[in-house]
Image: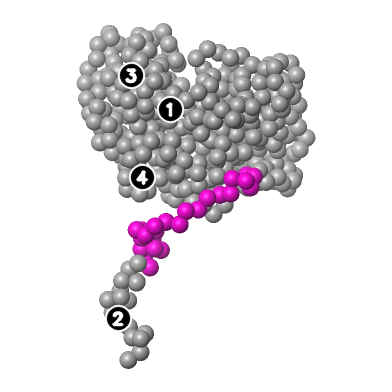
Amino acid sequence: MSSFTCNPFKTRTAQILLALAVLGLAQGPAVARTVDPKASSIVRADPVALGFDPARLDVASQALAVDVASGKIAGAYLLVGRRGKVAFEQGFGVQGPGQTTPVSNETIFRVFSMTKPIVSVTAMTLVEQGKLSVDDPVSKYLPEYATLMVWQADGTRVPAKTPMLVRHLMSHTSGLIYGFIQPNAPISKVWAAGGENRNDLTAREYARLLAGLPLKSEPGAAFNYSHSTDVLGAVVEVAGGKPLDVLVRERVTGPLGMTDTLFWQPETRRARFAEPKNNQPGVYFDYARPTPYLSGGGGMSSTTEDYLRFVLMLAGNGEYKGVRILKPATLLRMRQDETTPEIRRAGLFFPGPGMGFGLGFSLVQDEKVQRPGAGTFSWWGIAGTEFWVDPKNEVFMVFMVQAREFAQEYQRKNRAWIYDALVK
């Protein structure tokens, strides 16, 4: 008998394993794939070929140069691209007051709330593995969230009627708040007194602290920009079984080769840090002096070159240079609006008219009101950093600066500069 005689059991097993492999369900060890961190994410192309008018892009260049020369900002970096290629990228000024080092694509900026999309994507990798569901109650992972209280106008508190879900955290409809948005509001004072501004706790300990503070609204009832993603970070730790920084590195930044995107930077990189012209107390943390707190909502710093890798992954439907972070269907789920007109009206700090909010991103719903195309997803940081991905027009951008007082001004200007220059 030939040694190749068919064994029905082995044949059927092989067929099953092949089917599982095709479906991505096989349980064997995955082959680790990582984008080369030494190969730059910035691939330049002719702006005209990408549909931009170079003279109009130069308007942005001249305006930012004037802002540096006038002393308005110390420095900034703007990158604009289309179809995976970069049409415009330029650094302006220096890394900080009194410095002589020019801003470059390797300058490290505090990206603050641009941490949120990274942590949200990390959470969705756990969803893909069945370790987490966006429809799970938060209390499944953090038991103290089973007994939440809601603030009333007279200062009293009543038990929440609806459970807080994971998707409420990702869409800022959890009922949690940021006290700095209305610092003099009674509920904000209660939060401040209750330890909202502590940074000596771990992500898990901080989430436990917030569970004891009153919600501003019932979960799912209003958009209130908040510490929601900080609590999501604790959920991710429990679901993933590791510290947040490890999970982010293993699942997102590591595979993408984002070696300069960290919660805390080594002291050896201090010469690359961007600093603000106006160093407002309590805003600009020291990148290289770690505390126990890993803020999923705003604790990371990055470079333009590094963050572009993340942006290009999003523009590539979850894949960058052959490394897949999310399935296209997962990213599409993140881009579904979690808000309603009632939810938007009821809260504070919503992105604006014509906008929605998904699982970690703001969403352009009406391009007649907003310049980027309908379907654009994005977010920004309190110091003025910003990114967006516009699938309709195949446009992406990254903007880096450390100037909280001009954050919203530059958001408006970036939209005008970029879409005035997009001529075809």
Residue position for label 4: 127
Residue designated by label 3: 216
Q: Is residue 317 above or below residue 292?
A: below
Labels in figure, total = 4
Question: In this picture, which residue range is highlighted in magenta?
Answer: 18-41
User: Which numbered disc, 4 or 1, marks the residue closer to the eye?
Assistant: 1
Secondary structure of the residue carrying numbered label 2: loop
Q: Earlier in the sequence, mark 2 or mark 3?
A: 2
Q: Quadrant of residue 308?
A: top right
Of the numbered discs 4 and 1, the one sitting upstream in the chain is 4
Give, as a three-letter code, the residue at label 4.
Val
Instruction: Count residues near mark 1 (Cα–Cα under 10 Å), then give few for <14, some for 14-19, many for 20+.
Output: many
Q: Are marks 3 and 1 in contact (CB under 8 Å)?
A: no
Measure how far apart labels 1 and 2 are at the Cα level. 55 Å
Residue 332 in view, yes or no: no
User: Which residue sits at x=35%, y=67%?
Assistant: 17
Where residue 244 sits: x, y (%)? Answer: 40, 35
> Would residue 190 be found to the left or right of residue 75 on screen?
left
